[in-house]
Image: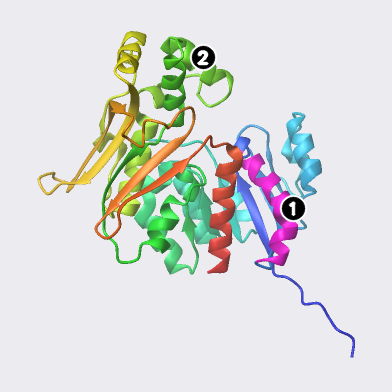
């Protein structure tokens, strides 16, 4: 009797948001496709891609991904790859027919929208919801987690903080029964790069211009410089790791605008460095049971934060059973964020 090779399960994916991270995710998927067919034994086809500025496309048969990437990077619209006309992003979600939505649209610190509504729609349509977006985690974590559970699906967001480092996975799977007491660290890579370059003699304005030139700072850098990006990451970590809902404007926040070259120089003379440090601890006297802050702080060589330079990040988590657990991510890139998305996708499907 002739042997037969069992067919691998094939999952259909849709990407909502196709900037640097979305493209890096697609490249990683192409790179890993043979490995994934071997272990864990899965195959994928991308049936939907939507960009904020270059159109939307749906094709149930899947796209020629290398051809699509090349055309997109040459300024072509995604519309030419679509088998059906599409309107807005909600119509894209309803018509893509995917098993999982990978969402990488821009963050909204204040409300989490419209990404929150996109993920809600994906779960209601029967798709796993995977995101790199901090806003929906802060503003919709409990709602989306409950909705996913009700529909037998997953809502995962590993890349929302520290790119692809497994911060949330550690808490979800690696610390069962542990109580997170607090955490501290450096979570905003842009301000860390700015301060590192100021130590080399640049003014803050020159360092910001460099960060903008290499694409890690926006044309309006206030989200980083004034601490909003760090605040929303702190809020996401508190909400998930400590099960205490927290909004960014409830984090005590001071940015780095007041740090001058003289202050940077004086710290170096003392063998210290300025860092934008987040700090969170349970506090019975606080109305929310938590004290959370982000502020510039001088750290000495005895601190793990001292050697975190450039775009690297660090998070030190304190629990009731392990003491201090430290995660360091060195020089992240869109590829590391893309890996966090891929890891979430595999974890969702393996469930």
The residue located at (60%, 35%) in the rendering is 52
Which residue lies most toward the bottom here?
A: 1
The residue located at (51%, 37%) in the rendering is 330
The residue indicated by pointer 2 is 209
The magenta-colored residue range is 21-39
Q: Is residue 118 left or right of residue 326?
A: right
Q: Nearer the viewer, residue 217 or 318?
A: 318
Q: Nearer the viewer, residue 84 or 93?
A: 93
User: Which label sits on residue 124?
Assistant: none
Which residue lies most toward the left here?
A: 285
User: Which label sits on residue 59?
Assistant: 1
Report the coloring of the rendering: rainbow
The residue located at (42%, 63%) in the rendering is 173
**Does the magenta portion include 27?**
yes
Q: Quadrant of residue 147?
A: bottom left
**Number of marks drawn:** 2
> Which is more foreground, mark 2 or mark 1?
2
Q: Is residue 293 left or right of residue 230?
A: left
Label 2 CA crowd tier, 10 Å (few <14, some 14–19, many 20+): some
Label 1 CA crowd tier, 10 Å (few <14, some 14–19, many 20+): some
- Can residue 178 be seen? yes
Q: Nearer the viewer, residue 313 or 284?
A: 313
Taken as a whole, is the magenta stretch helix, strand or loop?
helix
Q: Position of residue 272 (x, y in %)?
A: 32, 23
The residue located at (58%, 65%) in the rendering is 349
Query: SS class of the residue under badge 1?
Result: loop
């Amino acid at each position: 009797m002739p042997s037969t090779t069992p067919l691998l399960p094939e999952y259909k994916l849709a990407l909502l948001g196709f900037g640097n991270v979305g493209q890096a995710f697609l490249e990683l998927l192409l790179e890993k496709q043979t490995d994934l067919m071997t272990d864990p034994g899965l195959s994928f086809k991308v049936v939907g891609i939507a960009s904020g500025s270059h159109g939307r496309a749906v094709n149930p048969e899947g796209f020629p991904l290398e051809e699509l990437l090349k055309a997109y990077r040459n300024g072509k619209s995604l519309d030419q790859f679509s088998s059906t006309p599409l309107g807005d992003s909600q119509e894209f979600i309803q018509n893509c027919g995917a098993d999982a939505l990978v969402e990488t649209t821009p963050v909204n610190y204040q409300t989490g929208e419209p990404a929150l509504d996109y993920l809600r729609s994906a779960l209601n349509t029967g798709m796993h919801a995977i995101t790199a977006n901090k806003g929906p985690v802060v503003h919709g974590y409990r709602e989306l987690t409950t909705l996913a559970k009700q529909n037998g699906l997953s809502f995962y967001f590993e890349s929302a903080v520290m790119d692809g480092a497994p911060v949330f996975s550690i808490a979800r799977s690696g610390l069962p029964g542990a109580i997170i007491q607090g955490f501290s660290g450096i979570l905003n890579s842009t301000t860390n790069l700015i301060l590192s370059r100021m130590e080399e003699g640049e003014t803050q304005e020159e360092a910001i211009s460099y960060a903008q030139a290499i694409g890690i700072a926006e044309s309006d850098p206030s989200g980083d410089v004034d601490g909003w990006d760090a605040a929303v990451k702190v809020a996401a970590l508190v909400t998930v790791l400590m099960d205490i809902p927290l909004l960014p404007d409830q984090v005590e926040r001071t940015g780095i605008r007041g740090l001058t070259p003289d202050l940077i120089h004086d710290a170096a003379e003392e063998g210290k460095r300025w860092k934008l440090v987040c700090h969170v601890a349970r506090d019975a006297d606080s109305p929310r049971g938590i004290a959370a802050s982000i502020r510039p702080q001088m750290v000495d060589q005895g601190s793990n934060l001292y050697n975190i330079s450039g775009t690297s990040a660090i998070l030190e988590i304190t629990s009731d059973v392990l003491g201090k657990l430290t995660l360091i991510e060195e020089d992240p890139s869109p590829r590391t964020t893309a890996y966090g998305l891929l890891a979430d996708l595999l974890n969702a499907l393996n469930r």
